[in-house]
Amino acid sequence: MPSVTGRAVEVPAVGGDFQVVQREFPEPGPGHVRIRVQACGVCHSDSITKFGVFPFITYPRVPGHEVAGIVDAVGADVPMFKPGQRVGLGWHGGHCNYCIPCRRGDFILCENQLISGVHFDGGYADYVVAPANALAFIPDGLSAVEAGPLLCAGITTFNSLRNSGARPGDTVAILGIGGLGHLAVQYAAKSGYRTIAIARGQDKAPLAQQMGAHIYIDSTKQDPAAELQKLGGAVVILSTLTSADALTQAVDGLAQGGKLIITGVPEKPLELNAVPLILGRRTVMGWPSGTGMDSEDTLNFSALTGIKPMTEVYPLEKAAEGFDRMMSGKARFRAVLTTGA
Ligand SMILES: [Zn+2]
Ligand SMILES: [Zn+2]
C-alpha cells in the first residue's frame, strides 16, 4: 500500500484563502483507514478551521467533516474495513478509548476526541486518512452526494431528536429551515412526531410542508412561542438557529417538562429567565453530533425512510465558491464538493 498523490484544498494559515495543492497521502498507520473521497459536504463549522476559531489548530489544514467515499487502504489492527467498501466520516474523528467517558462507553464525550478537518486533514481532498473507529458504512440507497451532508447536518439533528425523549405523536418544533433544519424537519416527521417548522417568511411554508412539516409558523408574522402554546406547547424544540434572542423567546413555547435543544451556536450568550425553567421543569441543552455508529444509524434511517438532503454540487477545485455560498446563507441547502471519483 504505497502513498498516493491527489488534490487537497488547504487553508494555509488562519483566515487564509483556500489553496488547491497536490499532496502525498500516506498509507494508513495502525487503526487507520485511507478513504478515496467522492463527496464532502460544506458545513458552517468548517469556518472553525478557516478562521482559526480553535487556537490549537495547526496549518496548513484541510477542512471537511461530511466525507463520503470508498475505503482505499487499511492499516494494521483494523478488522472491520476492507478496500472497496463505502464509508462515511463525520465531525467525530475518533476517540481514545481510555478517558473516563470512553471507559463508560460514551465516546462522543471523549476528552481526547479528534475532530475531522480540525485535528487532522478532512474531506476537501481526493483522500482522507482517518481513525477506523470514527467511520460508518454507507447503505446502497444513498449516493455519496446524499450521504455527505447526513454525516454532520443529518446526524446532529437525527441523533438529538432520537435521544430527546420525545415519543411518536409528541409535538416537536424545529427552529430554522437551513442546512440542519431542512433535515431536522424530515427526521421529526418520519419519526412520527407532530412536526412544526418555524422559519422567517411565508415563502418557506411550501418547502416545510414538502419536508413533512404538519404545521408551519412564520416567525416574521406570528409569535412562535404563543403559537406553540396554542398547540399545547412543544415537548421538544430543536434549534438550528444562531439568533440568541430567538432562542431565548423559544423557551416560552415549551410544554411543561419540555426541552430546548441547541445545535447551532448563537452569536452571543443566552439570557434566560429561570422561572419558567424551574416551575415547568424545562431543560435547555446542547447536542454535539454522534459517533461513527450514530452516523451509520442516521444513514440507514435516511435510506429506509427516503430522507435526503437538498444539495448544490461544486467540483473540488471550486471549494472556495462552495464555502462562500454556504457562508452567505443562500445555499439550498447544503453545498457539497465532489472529486469526480
Ligand atoms: Zn458540521
Ligand atoms: Zn476518550
Image: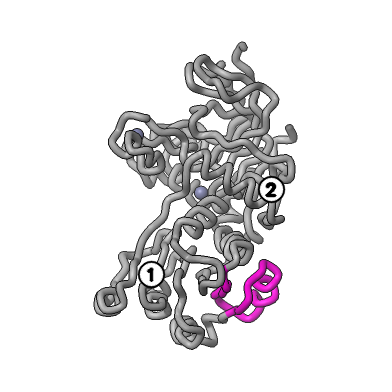
Q: Position of residue 118 (x, y in %)?
A: 44, 38
| Point 65% across, 45% down: residue | 147
Query: Which span of residues is magenta-colored?
Result: 193-216
**Residue linked to disc 2:** 146
Q: Nearer the viewer, mark 2 or mark 1?
A: 2
Secondary structure of residue under mark 2: helix
Determine crowd level at label 1: few under 14, some 14-19, many 20+ residues with C-alpha closer than 10 A.
Answer: some
The answer to whether one can see residue 214 in this image is yes
The answer to whether one can see residue 329 in this image is no
Residue 204 in magenta stretch: yes
Residue found at the far top of this picture: 2
Residue 182 higher or lower than 292, as above or below: below
Q: Quadrant of residue 257?
A: bottom left
Q: Amino acid at mark 1?
A: Ala
Mark 1 vs ligand 1: CB below 8 Å: no
- Mark 2 or 1, nearer chain start: 2
Of 38 and 49, the residue lying toward us: 38
Q: Position of residue 199 (x, y in %)?
A: 55, 74
Q: Which mark is residue 201?
A: none
Q: Are marks 2 and 1 in contact (CB under 8 Å)?
A: no
Of 324 and 27, the residue lying toward us: 27
Of 278 and 313, the residue lying toward us: 278
Which of the image's four quarters has the C terminus? top right
Q: In what quadrant does ligand 2 lie?
A: top left
| Point 32% across, 68% down: residue | 270
Relative placement, left or right, of 67 versus 307 is left
Q: CA distance from mark 2 to mark 1?
A: 31 Å
| Point 45% across, 42% down: residue | 49
